[in-house]
Amino acid sequence: MTEALSKIDSMRRAMGFLSIEETLILAGGSIRMPDPASVLISPGVALAEDVILWPNVILEASNGGRLSIGAGTILFPGVRIVASGADVMVGSGVEIGEEGGFTVKAEAGSRIEIGDEARLLGGGSLSSSNRIGRGAQILGPIRCQNCRLGDGGSHRHPEPDERGAVLKGAGVARGIELDQGQVIQAFGLFADGAVRFQSYFHPKAGR
């Protein structure tokens, strides 16, 4: 068993990740990992208190890239976040990857910011430069490139039009810019989708 673990650790280090023992040390602190052996983390990745890393999460920083995860953020199974010669900054209280994982990949010359209490679900991805604002949401298998989603309240905010911007559906979103309370639902190219306010999908009685 010791020899097998040694081989695994050698492979991890060769690929730029912490050893199992080093990962266990993280899990013994304020970072919660139910299955540390299935989690891959590069040295230098900044993890704030109370981050939850579910199995099969990959946090990879290489070629001088910087990757930080804010306090209380939850990364569900199948999340891969890569900062290769670029910056990826994830805020506090963010939820990424429920219902199918999620991929975030910033390469040289790009920057990805994900604001506090944002929610990225359903097997989508972020690539190139993106700013996903506070409380914004990406719901579904949507490939986002160079998008900006405006700040707002979280999905729990009682007023839909005061929440962060939302993309929902499936397809490709390139260069999309939405302000607080706005949403596009599309199945295909999001550039062809109608921009609406979120109250369109969440009407209140009497309105």
Image (tube, rainbow, N blue to C red):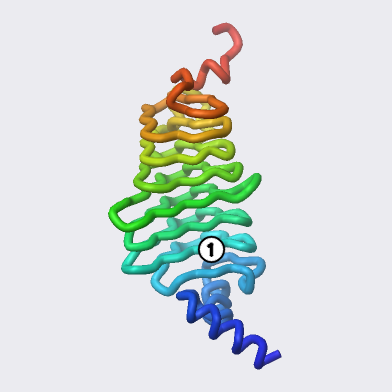
**Residue 19, image x, y percentages:** 53, 80
Q: Is residue 93 left or right of residue 123?
A: left
**Residue 171, image x, y percentages:** 54, 34
Residue at left offset 67%, top offset 88%: 4
Name the outermost residue toward the left. Answer: 109
Q: Is residue 158 above or below residue 101?
A: above
Q: Is residue 151 left or right of residue 140?
A: left
The N terminus - image quarter: bottom right
Q: Quadrant of residue 37?
A: bottom right
Q: Is residue 108 above or below residue 156?
A: below
Residue at left offset 64%, top offset 63%: 55
Please count the marks in the image: 1
Name the one closer to the observer, 148 or 7: 7
- The residue to which callout 1 is attached is 58
**Residue 53, image x, y percentages:** 57, 61
Residue at left offset 46%, top offset 75%: 16
Name the outermost residue toward the right. Answer: 1
Name the outermost residue toward the bottom. Answer: 3
Q: Is residue 155 above or below residue 42?
A: above
The C terminus - image quarter: top right
Is residue 150 visible in this depiction of the protein?
A: no
Name the outermost residue toward the top. Answer: 206
Residue at left offset 53%, top offset 25%: 185
Name the one closer to the observer, 54 or 84: 84
Is residue 58 visible in this depiction of the protein?
A: yes
Q: Which secondary structure, mark 1?
A: strand
What amino acid type should be assigned to the residue bearing mark 1? Ile
**Residue 42, image x, y percentages:** 45, 71
Q: Quadrant of residue 11?
A: bottom right
Label 1 Cα crowd, 10 Å radius (few <14 / some 14-19 / many 20+): many
